[in-house]
Structure formats: structure tokens, C-alpha cells
Amino acid sequence: MEKSYNPYDNAQAQFDGVAELLGLDEGTRDLLRQPLREYHVLIPVHMDDGSTKVFKGFRVQHNDARGPAKGGIRFHPHETADTVRALSMWMTWKCALVDIPLGGGKGGVICDPHHLSEAEQERLCRGWVRQLAKVMGPSLDVPAPDVMTSAKHMLWMLDEFETIHGGRYPGFITGKPIGMGGSLGRTEATGYGVIYILRQALKDLGIGIEDATICFQGFGNVAQYAGRLFTELGGTVLAVSCWDNNAHQAFTFRKKDGIDVDKLAAITSAYGTVDREKAQADGIEVLPGEEWISQEVDILVPSALENQITPANVDKISKTVKVIAEGANGPTTPDADEIIKGRGIFLIPDFLTNSGGVTCSYFEQVQSNTNFFWEKDEVLEKLDSKLTHAYRSLYSLAERKNLYMRDAAYVIAINRVVDAVRMRGWVR
Ligand code: GLU
């Protein structure tokens, strides 16, 4: 049987390794290796058929020493408290690494939006906020979109929060629709961010982007925008994969001379499932299963869920792969990570690679709070410069100290959070 992985164990193992390296004292380790606060709630929802269904939801605030907790809210049938704990921890490191004044949090609801109507989803969003409105807010904890949630969910949540608190609080949530406090560029930000960072990495490795091929696991928001920008810069999107919820399996889509990302996105559902017949009609090969991992490309971008690269499939990664850029949160298990490290593949860790989303969320908060909105170019320019700067500092530390990129990223992030908890006097 395949070993099962708990993302919280993975997140703690990663933290413990670096805490040891940094020689952190026991009190500081205890404070940072688990969440400061967490909430488990029940959300009763009136269903369209007249019945009531009770959903389970979570909000975890891992650390808010550097600023209000920040992080998305996911809808997923396999959500667990431990997954949300791990994700909240990774948000703390992500915000610290890109150096924005925010802490880390995450939310989740155990549900499958594929089987919920719009109206049921709206009631679920409002119900989640009703249970948590007293412990979240612009200065406490600020949610955002994540797996299977989007701008429309954010606005329902904001509306419920504002109804409860009796005022307008656009800084409560990010990823809002444009015109309703959202930032231009927020939808593109995570995917574009992957490529802003990758572009720097390719320079360091002496790989020309025009000669480079890439394969994405997943074809949701992250892969679609990353794929578009990669193509614009002259690279070739050789393959992408998607999950088909009806077929209960994954499919990989491949085109040797490059996939037209816009065209493929046009035949993809809101949950990232590609229409196989239409893809085939467009000359794209359709391979059943998790073939994305064995594609002969220069760059692999796991941009779906956690625990996707494990010892069971890590050896399938082609010898051609020079870079793995983790678009998803926690896609690589620690034991598979050791193997990647051993093979000398250049890994760009998740909490840098996908930090474009939260960085743009921070810009959105700034715009919402001042009620002054920037042009899209201005947002993307600021995003590029923030991420490029974070990458450059990380790469130079990794080079200087001869550290694996993930470890170097942890060193920078943990040091910043440790400074904050010390300055606040939480630990000595
Ligand atoms: N859900 C995204 C992430 O995992 C964005 C979070 C945010 O914007 O707060 O980073």
C-alpha cells in the first residue's frame, strides 16, 4: 500500500530541520511549530431541496507577530484540520520571505463545490463567516481565494462580514472582484509570479527561456496564467494535466510544438477540467493518468495540491528536468524532497514560487484601505520587483552558504518571524 502523508507532519518536519540548523531554543520552537489559534466550526446550510446539511469548517491562525494572519480559504472534500494547520504555517513563512507585514493563516471547509449550486455555495460562504466574524477582520485575520474558491465567494463573505459588523470593511478580505475593492492583476498574480521568479532562476542557470519547455500539473488559475506568460516570453508549454472529477482520474495533455494556453483555457471548466474531445480535435494528445511527472521537459511545475511528488513517483521525473518550481502549496513530501536534492535538480520552494498571490493581496489591502486603485501595469511592476528581490536574496544566501533552496528560504523566513516574536517579547 502507498504510504499516506500528513501535510502538518511535513510542515513540522521542515520547520524542525531548520530550527535545528539555526539552533533555536525550545520555547521559540514550541511557539512556531504549531498554530497560535485555531477554530473548528459547524456550518448549517439550507440546501435547495429543502433539507439542511451541516458542513465542517476551519480557520487556523498560525502566527500573527508580523501582522494580521493572512491566507486563503479552500473548499475541498478531503480538507482536514491538519491540512489547514500546515497551510497556515506555510503562509507565515511565505509572507515573511517576501517581506510583507502579514502573518499566516488558512481556512477550509469540507465540501465538494462540484455538487453544490451557486445558491448553496453562497449560503456556505455566509455561514462560514457568521461562525468566524468575531475572530477575523482587517486587523486580525484576512482571508483570500484558494482551491475551489474565487472572487464571487470573497464578495459573499465580505457582504456577510459587513452586515454583521455594520459598516464597510473592504480590508477584511482580498481577491475581491474588480470594481468591488479588488486589485487589477490579482487573478493573474499567482501564475505570473511563478514566471517572474522562474525567469530569474533560468538566468542563474544559464537556460534561455526561448529554448525551455515546461509541464504543469493542474490547469487551474495558477497554471493558466503562468502558462500564458511563459509562452509570451518565448517558452513552450509542452504539457499540462488536469483532474476529472466525473472520471475520478487525472489526464495529461501534450503537444510537442507547444500548447496554446488561451485555446485550452477556453475549453476548461471553472474547476480546471479540460474537455478531452475538444482538446483532441485540436491536435493535443490526451494521456490518461499522472503522466505529467514523466514528461521530458526542462521545468516541472506541480500546481495542483499537496503531497503530489512522493517516493512512489519521484523516480519518474525525467533526466531532462533541471528545475522544479512548486506552484502549489506543499506538493513535495520530505522524503521525495531528499531525492530531488540528491539529484541536484534546482528546486524553487512553494512558499516563494506561489507567493505572487498573497503579495498582490497585500497590494489589494493597501488599495482598499486607502480607497485609491492602481493601474494594472503598476500592480504587476510592483509584484515583479517584490518577487524578484525576494528571489535574489534567497538565491544569494543559498549560494553563499551552500544551502538547498528550500532550506535557505526557511532560514530567511524563520529568522524574520523569530525577530518579530522576540521584539514583541513573546520569547526571550
Ligand atoms: N491562497 C493563496 C496562497 O496560498 C493566496 C493567499 C492570500 O492572498 O492571502 O498563497
Image (cartoon, rainbow, N blue to C red):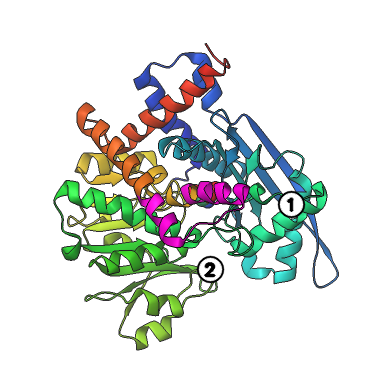
Say which mark, if any, is on residue 205: none
**In this picture, residue 34 sits left or right of residue 130:** left
Instruction: For mark 1, give the secondary structure.
Output: loop
Name the amino acid, label 2: Tyr
Quadrant in the picture for residue 195: bottom left
| Disc 1 CB within 8 Å of nearest ligand 1 atom | no
What's the residue at 33%, 37% (across, down)?
406
What's the residue at 41%, 36% (across, down)?
97
**Distance of label 1 from label 2 (alpha carbons):** 31 Å
Name the amino acid, label 1: Arg
What's the residue at 43%, 36% (across, down)?
99
The residue closer to the viewer here, 230 or 381, is 381
**What range is drawn magenta here?**
359-384
- The residue labelled by disc 2 is 271
Relative to residue 395, is residue 244 depicted above or below?
below
Residue 170: give x, y in percent of width and height. 66, 51
